[in-house]
Image (spheres, rainbow, N blue to C red):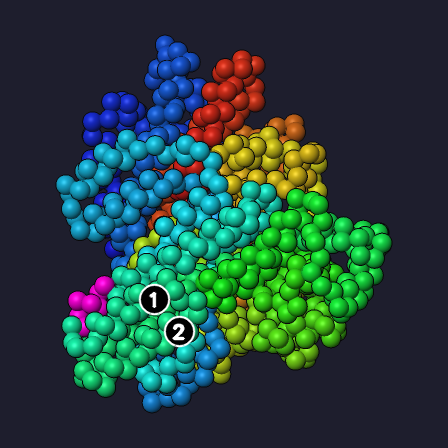
Amino acid sequence: MTSSSQHFTREVSLRYQLYNGLFLTLPFPSLEAVGIRLPLFSEYCGKALAQGKSPSDIVEAFFSDMLPDASFEKVMNTLFLLTQLIERQIVLFDALEDAAFPETRGMERRGSVPGCLSGVPERQLRERLAPVLESYRTRVVLTAHPTQFYPEPVLGVIEELSTALRRNDLASIELLLLQLGKTSFKNSDAPTPLSEATSLLNRAHKAFYESILDIETLIDEALGDQRPESTVIELGFWPGGDRDGNPYVTTATTLEVAAGLRRCALDHYRREISKLRRRLTFPGMRERLDAIDAKLELYADPGDLLRDIRALCDSLVQNHQSLYVDQARRFYNAARAFGLHFASLDLRQDSSAHEEITALLVQELRGMDYSSLTAVERAGVLADLIASNLTAVKAPDHPLAKDCFDSLSAVGQIQKQNGPRGMHRYIISNTQSASHVLEVMFLSRCAGYTDLPFDIVPLFETIEDLRNAPKVMAALYSLPLYCQHLKQRGGCQTVMLGYSDGTKDGGYLSCNWEIFTAKRELEALSQKSGFEVVFFDGRGGPPARGGGNTHRFYRALGASLKQTEVQLTIQGQTISSNFGSHAAARHNLEQLFTSGLEGKLFAEDAACPCLEESTLMAQLSEKSLEAYKGLRSHPSFIAFLEEMTPLQEFGQLKIASRPTRRRSDRKLQLSDLRAIPFVASWSQVKLNVPGFFGLGTALQWAFDTGLKKRIHELYASNAFFATLIDNSMQAIAKSDTRYTQHLAKDPCHGELISVIHEELRRTRQLILEITDQESLLARDPVNQQSIAVREQLIMPLIVIQHYAMAQAKQNSDPERRQAFEKLLRKTIPAITNASRNSA
């Protein structure tokens, strides 16, 4: 057992037993009685599931034994109280894990900045590191996607409880547990885009600010006066700018969020000035600080702020023996990293919206039916229009067009207030052709821009679109007007790849391989065309959405890709679980930052996949895709999601402003369903299909065709393949067939369930053989322990959920059906929160 896992056992698992016992003895009139019943119910569930009993039979038998004369109301009240108690136990466990983070997970030297730099001989460090940091950076983009189920008050309790647990402050712990018992876990109102942005910023700004400055300081110490002026970690922000599928995001929202981001940066600078005032009490220094303070609201160019702080630092060096210059440089680093914008706000809209608006304008300007043209013909028409002396055009009389023109106009307004980095990217979801990119160029010209003040970022998501991405970019690179735009923007093209929708479309293994292949082809194409390409990964929390051990993924790419930058989204639940505290944020930011840096500093040690390995990976990907498509096309696939998972209830939960479906005016199709509720629904029933399905079939094919030895060698030698296998283990470790085994005989869903269960069994068995482990995640004991405890905690809750689902479907009494639906909705957040990265 490693020191980290020993610490986890001592500081998390054992302390949980202690404080849970305290929690159950606190005077909660409503929870006191069920506190005694919960351990009995949990034990009963475990034994009954092992015997193959269904959740409905388990609940009914338990209450028949324990409360034989209980009324319907009494049974339902007990089930609600059990759910409330379990969700609070999960909070306690979260707080204990957060409190122990520095010792259990923050001890890893590999991946830390000092650990990374220690591999370079000291005399060569400045010579090798400084040129790399001229261009290399990490960009973390915060989103408000609906994966955060904890309301703000509960997140506050977790933060304070973690602090009290770290200090062993028993009095505060008891008070906070009392507070926890009385705090509602339900949002009273559905969030608006503005409230989502405000909540996310309030929750995340401090941890990110302090952590990024810590890393900046480490780079300063390593490079001294050879430190490049570029920042090493940048923040991006989607709430308020992401319109894709969210009709509630308006231009007014965008402008208000941008103003809030500027305020956030300036508030931090005021605190830096206040700290410096207490130290720089020398003649002339207070006046310099006062002058900067007085101009904070007036700065329009972040460069002016940096020059003023630089003059302050220089004066300390020249006139005051460099006294407190490190604190002044911290202020300088903050202004360099966060500018006047704190985080760069991105615009995002679906390509279909641009198509619709462009069709109206082309009809008006050229009298042509744009919708009847092929993609190639559309590109030709748009190129001609853009190349003409097109001046500002009035927006068509259409709500979508007005919002598009207004949002484009907002770019200029935001850049005037927040600086050029305040908003400088326009992301096009569902990009399928060059015309989709040219539409944004065309609309920008119509909105009054001659030279676009932002980068256009195509987002490729489905397997077909990923395979087509090089053709789309080749078509764009062949257009002089697009090349001119890229040169004007610094000769760099950002391309976004969507892991969430890619996995939903093609399954785990195929999506990851297709994205890797697309990146290699796009990099070669861009280099040949004279441009640099940067990849922006749309990732979620679980492996099924590109999550898992993300830093290991980037580290595994080695020399396969240039990786000038590491860019990725951090969403909802992952923000609070991985970046919710200073210690966690710093650890995970360092891991991400060094994951791409290592490949540049130690290029001689990084290996590219050979042709034989790539051929084998492509074969595995194709076999996996074939199996996943077979599952997707099963007659009961969509019906199972609708009837046997809580999918339909996600839209009723007040956790996000964005609808869960792209279209609700027709029978559900997989293309209409957003990736988050798709992945989350499978997670709720403990069958993490998007995180493993197809992988086992592909591995079995390799074993059956005499490639078993090659698969073992591939895992040992190819870090990319090994990371895919190891990340999938997390999805499998959180899957459990016991909750759905009773459905094997179901006339509608039995065949589908049997297929899924068999693939899960096959994948688990083959992964254990390939990795030479006796149990999943045996080489990651802290994660293994955490998952085991969490899965045990929610076992009775999953039984309750299945029972509520079955009863809601079967019960003909409207009032009782409504009560079961309410209970079902109550279980969803707690199960999600327990997984920490389930959606």
Whether pointer 2 and pointer 1 mark residues with C-beta atoms closer than 8 Å, the reply is yes
Identify the residue at image location x=46%, y=45%. 194
Identify the residue at image location x=59%, y=57%. 409
Secondary structure under the numbered disc 1 in the rendered image:
helix
Q: Which of 507 and 339 is in front in this view?
A: 339
Q: How far apart are marks 2 and 1 (CA)?
A: 10 Å
Residue 82 location (% of width, % of height) = 35, 27
Identify the residue at image location x=39%, y=41%. 150
Residue 411 location (% of width, % of height) = 55, 60
In the image, residue 658 sits, relative to residue 263, either above or below, namely: above
Q: Residues within 10 Å of mark 2 (few under 14, many from 20)?
A: few
Q: Is residue 89 left or right of residue 393?
A: left
Q: Name the residue under label 2.
A: 304
Instruction: Identify the mark nearer the N-term, 2 or 1.
Output: 1
Residue 731 location (% of width, % of height) = 49, 49
Which segment did they paint magenta? Answer: 274-280
